[in-house]
Structures are given as C-alpha cells and as structure tokens.
Image: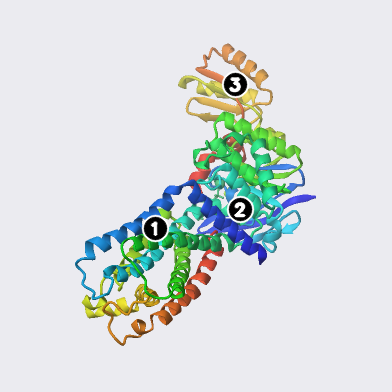
Amino acid sequence: MKSVIAEHLVKTYRKGEVKALDDLSLDVEEGTVLSVLGPNGAGKTTTVRILATLLKPDSGNASVAGIDVIKNPDKVRELIGLSGQYAAVDETLTGWDNLVMFGRLYHLGKTASIKRAEDLLERFSLTESARRPIKTYSGGMRRRLDLAASLIVQPRVLFLDEPTTGLDPRGRQEMWEVIQELVKGGVTLLLTTQYLEEADQLADEIAVIDHGKVIARGTSDALKKQVGGERLEITVENADIAKASEIVGRISASAVHVDIRTISAPVLTGSVALMDALRALDEAKIHPLDIGLKRPSLDDVFLSLTGHKAEEAEAKA
Amino acid sequence: MKNAITDSLIITKRQLLQLARVPEVLIFSTIQPVMFVLLFRFVFGGSISTGQPGGYVQLLMPGIFVQTVAFTLAATASGLAEDMKKGLIDRFRSLPIARSALVVGRTLGDSLLNILVLIVMAGAGYAVGWRPTASVLSVFSAFVFLLMFGYALSWTGIYAGLAVRDARTVQNVSFLITFPMTFLSNAFAPTTGMPKALQYVAEWNPVSTMVAACRQLFGLENQFGATANSFPSQHPLTTSIFYMILIMVIFIPLSVRKYKNSSN
Ligand SMILES: Nc1ncnc2c1ncn2[C@@H]1O[C@H](COP(=O)(O)OP(=O)(O)OP(=O)(O)O)[C@@H](O)[C@H]1O
Ligand SMILES: [Mg+2]
C-alpha cells in the first residue's frame, strides 16, 4: 500500500511568475523511506508543506495514509509528524517546556505529556539540557528537539525537511542514527536532502527533483548506475588535455567531461579504472598533476541527468 | 469546541511560561507605565490646573490606565509576528488543534498580562495620591471595562502581526499609531486647548471616550475640558462599547482570514 501519494502537483507563486512545483508526482510505499533529493529552490519544502497540509496546491491531488490532504486536512494532521527545514520550537522556553506543551496540544493529558516529554528527551540525549532555554542549544540539539516534537504521538507518516542541513559531521552522524532507529520502528518516512550521501544512507528510494519536477527516480544503486557510480578525475598540463581525454574516454564507458585542466568521467569499478588510467598515462608519458576517484555527488547526478550543474539550476530558478 | 478552548488555554499558558523564563519582559512592561505615572504626576501635575478635588492625579490615572492597555497591542503584534517568522507557526498548523487556538490564546494571554499591569499601576497610583470616590462595584467595573478595551484592541495587534510579520517593524508601526492616539485625547490635558479640528478628532477618539468613561466610573464629574454637548463626551460609556464592538467586528474576521491565508 502507498502511504503517501502526490499526483500532478502544481504550485505557483507571485501570480504564476514563480513555478515552485510543475506537475510533480511521487509516492511512498508504507514502511519505507523516500528521499527527495534536489538543489536549492527545487521545490522540496513546497512539496513537504503541501503533503503536511500547510499549503494548498494550485492543482493536483495528494493523500497521506489514504486520506486526502486537501479535503481532509484535520484527519491527516492526526497521523503525521513534521520537522520543517528550520527548527520550529519556542526559543524562550526550555526543551522540557516545549515537549510538554506539544504533548498537551496533542491532548495527551498532563501526566502523559510529562512522561512522553521525558522519554523523548532521554531518547534524543537531551535530558541534561532539558531545563535550559532552546536559545542556548546548539544547531544539532535544536534539530533533535524539533524531531522529538514531531514524534510526540507516534506518527504513521513522518516528514523531515533537510534534517541535517547546517549540522557538522558529528551532528549529521547522530541525526542519521536517530533517523535509522525511527525507520526500524516502522514509520513511513519522506525526507528531503541536498546530499546524495544522505539519501544513500537513509533511503530505500530516491526521487531527484529539479524545477518542481521529478527528473529521476529509483533506488540509490539504480541512480548511481545511471550516474556511473564513481568518477575518475585527472588533472593534467594544458598540452596533454587532448591525449588524456582520449585515455579517459577509453576507460570509461560514458561521456568525458572536461573542466579547464580536469578531465572526469564515470567509471564502473573505481580501483581498476584508476590502475588502468595510471598505466595508460605512463605509457603515453603524461604526468598527471592530480589523479583520483570521486564519489558521485548531487552535482554529478545533476550533470548526468540534466546536463547542467545543481548551482546552475538554482541560478535559473 | 471544548478542544478549541483547552487548546487556546495551552497557548495562553505558554505565554505565561515565556514570562516566567524571561522575567525582564514583565518587569519592563510594568516599569514603563509606573514611570509615566510618576513623570506626569510630579513633572506636569504642578503646572496643569484642573480645579479637580484631589488634584491632577485623579484625572491622570484613568488616562494612564487606558494608555497602558492600548500600548500592549504592540506586544501582541510583535509576539505573533515572531511566531509567524520562525516557522513555529508551521508546527502549530501541522498539529491536530483548533486553528484559532494560537491567536485566541494570545489575546487571552495579553489580557492576563493587562490584569497584572493594571494591579501594579493601581498600586503606584494609590501611592501618589489617587483615590477613586465611587463605589467599589463601580471602580471594579471600570477595570473590567479597561480589560475589555484591551481585549478588543489586541485583535488589531493580531491583525498587524499577521500582516507585517516582522516583530521589530510591527512594534514600531504599533507605536506610531497608538502614541499619537493616546496624546491626541483627553488623557493628559484638556481637549479645549487644541485647535478646533483636532478637538473634534480628540473627542471622538476611542481613547478619549474610554478615559472619560473610566473617570465617570471612578466617580469624577470633571470631563477635563471636553466641549459640552458633543455626543461622545456626554455618552462616553455607550460610545466606548460601540467602539469595542466595532473593532472586534472588523478585526476578528480580518485576522481569521489573514491567518488562514497566511501560508499560501
Ligand atoms: N512564498 C513564496 N513566494 C515566492 N516564491 C516562493 C515562495 N516560497 C517558495 N518560493 C519559490 O519556489 C521555489 C521552490 O521553493 P522551495 O522552498 O520549495 O525549494 P527547496 O527545494 O525547499 O529549496 P531549499 O533547498 O533552498 O530549501 C523557489 O524558486 C522559491 O524561490
Ligand atoms: Mg527547502
């Protein structure tokens, strides 16, 4: 069964001038994780806000757990949890205050709200700072508290909008662990991100969006195959560019990309390709300034799917 | 319906908690009116001749009460604007609660704040010689009346907060409106000294009608220089009630509409 369905969503701003969503369709199978991957301005937040009943689309349909989000938003709100792109908690109140208040707003009753707040604080390693105002929290703590607030009542479907943007590597790692824990508990999750690595770690399926449209969709492996997995990257002197490009073209099955003096192309097995490249370069008496393997980034996905880089997409948007 | 009320009360409680966590806000919002009491009583009090038994302070206190209540709408507006900005509003909207709760809860919270501030000010007034002469019931009803006025005005604050959405800007805008309104009135000086056109404005000004109504309820005869026979100065209570209803009839639906559309 599909827990989340979005069909042909269109949303424009400024009287049609800005097209945030342009016929966007996606769905999430119950109990799985879909990651919506896209650059700034792609329409991630707009999609999440429509699915979470905060925004009405100009046209199109959407349902969560079988309930129409446009016709029956109140019902949907009882089943979802949302953690928006910017932590949405009361800064002047303490972590404890916030969670108890949200518990009360879910009509849990006083003792149950307190119990739930304390459980969640414990689970997200916030017990020690529970009595401090949120103002004094670090970005990672804030994000965790925000996530905790969206889990007061075990949601059937959880929406996380860029849960790790702005966190340092450790904060990101902690967040991933927390999310993986949740997924084990069986929640259906729709998560947006700008990082391919994050989608790779957390998602069963990835939908790549650009300019308000889904431009590719599939498992992380399938997408990577499409992008070509790892990329071989060689930087050489100007005089050697032509020859080196030819070598890289022989090793890689796909198109070669040349950016100033750096030649790159997707390769299937990185280590083998690297050795082949070194050998061929040596035979041709070319001394590379730099040579290495690069894991595909969002940029690479974009490059191979749309022919332009993620930043260019943003500039055009 | 029952949920709508409990939800609103939870939001009200949140506001009180905020005050408990940042007590400076409460301290400064009471210091300001108390300072006004002292300044007007001792700086201008001597130079304004009123013929009022008990002195200028009897006329002054109702004026300051109304002014203080009117000023709180700036806090209502900036508080709401702050919530709208931080994405906190998205969280509230994604909860299965009454949509009106966030807004209604805040208007109630501001009324509670007004109660507290009025008590402190009444104490300060008493300390500098304010002595209402009417019955206890009448004095009490004056305070109820002030709270009702504050409640009606808080809806204009709600609307301003939703419309402007920037806490600092909306606070300044609110002061730009309430400050002249409280001074273009009979609150601190007689209206008879003003140019004719301004006199007209001042007499119909809801602040003036509220001040005159409170003076009446506190037991004063003195209309503080109002032109005789003008309708608002003869029927300040009726006019004030009319204004309160008018404000709410206009601003409650406007705010509700603005709130509903605020995300699209
Ligand atoms: N209220 C608004 N008014 C005008 N344009 C808007 C509004 N909200 C979003 N947009 C535009 O809609 C497009 C999609 O925005 P959205 O916030 O959904 O992108 P996003 O993928 O979440 O980006 P980011 O990674 O920066 O969060 C952008 O071009 C944005 O400028
Ligand atoms: Mg976004």
- Identified at 55% across, 63% down, the residue is B104
Q: Which residue is mark 3?
A: A247
B201 over B79 or under it: above or below: below
Q: Nearer the viewer, residue B172 or B119?
A: B119
Q: Is B256 or A46 nearer to us in this picture?
A: B256
Circle 3 marks a residue in which chain?
A: A
Q: Amino acid at mark 3?
A: Ile
Q: Which mark is residue B171?
A: 1
Q: Secondary structure at mark 2?
A: helix
Disc number placed over residue B246 in the picture, else none: none
Q: Judge whether A289 appears above or below B152 on screen.
A: above
Query: Alpha-carbon distance for marks 2 and 1?
Result: 29 Å
Q: Position of residue A70 (x, y in %)?
A: 67, 61
- Marks 1 and 3, how far apart at CA: 67 Å
Observer-side mark, 2 or 3, equals: 2
* Badge 1 and badge 3 in a common chain: no
Q: Secondary structure at mark 1?
A: helix
Q: Which residue of the protein is positioned furthest toward the right in this rendering?
A: A1
Label 2 in the same subunit as label 3: yes
Given the current orientation, which residue lies at the most extreme left position? B47
User: Under tag 3, what secondary structure?
Assistant: helix
Using the image as rendered, state which of residue B2 and residue B252 is in the foreground: B2
In this picture, residue B184 sits left or right of residue A43 = left
Kind of residue indicated by mark 2: Arg
Q: Which one is nearer the viewer's eye here, A146 or B51?
A: B51
The amino acid type, in three-letter code, at marker 1 is: Gln
